[in-house]
Image: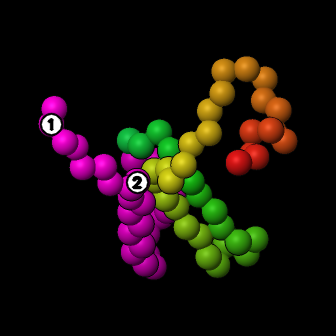
């Protein structure tokens, strides 16, 4: 029987400051199904990202109290 190396899950975070970029335009061009955008109320700071660190899914109507326990 072959022995397998089990490694803990890895989360990779890459952060790049891009002062003169259209975040929504960049986000629109990404093929990832997981996208996020945030800006402050004044529009002075905004950020965009793709990918997911964790997904919680279910097939039935969610009981959110139980879903986020443990």
Q: Position of residue 51 (x, y in %)?
A: 45, 50
Q: For the residues carrying marks 1 and 2, which lies nearer the camera in this image?
A: 1
Which of the two residues, 39 or 36, is positioned nearer the viewer here? 36
Q: Which residue is mark 2?
A: 9
Question: Whole-percent x and y of residue 13?
Answer: 41, 66
Residue drawn at point x = 66 percent, y = 27 percent? 58
Secondary structure character of the magenta stretch overall: loop
Quarter in which the N terminus is drawn: top left
Q: Residues within 10 Å of mark 1 (few under 14, many from 20)?
A: few
Which mark is first along the chain, 2 or 1? Answer: 1
Q: Which residues are magenta?
A: 1-30
Asked if the magenta segment contains residue 64, the reply would be no
The residue beneath circle 1 is: 2
Q: Residue at x 39, y 55 (%)?
A: 8
Are the residues tagged 1 and 2 within 8 Å (C-beta)? no
Residue 10 is inside the magenta segment: yes
Real-space Cα distance between discs 1 and 2?
Answer: 21 Å
Q: Residue at x 32, y 54 (%)?
A: 7
Q: Of 5 and 45, which appears nearest the observer?
A: 5
Judged left or right of residue 68, residue 63 is right
């Amino acid at each position: 029987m072959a022995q397998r190396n089990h490694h803990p899950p890895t989360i990779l975070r890459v952060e790049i400051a891009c002062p003169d970029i259209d975040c929504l335009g960049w986000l629109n061009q990404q093929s990832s199904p997981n996208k996020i955008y945030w800006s402050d109320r004044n529009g002075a700071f905004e950020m965009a990202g793709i990918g997911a660190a964790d997904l919680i899914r279910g097939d039935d109507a969610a009981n959110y109290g139980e879903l986020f326990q443990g």
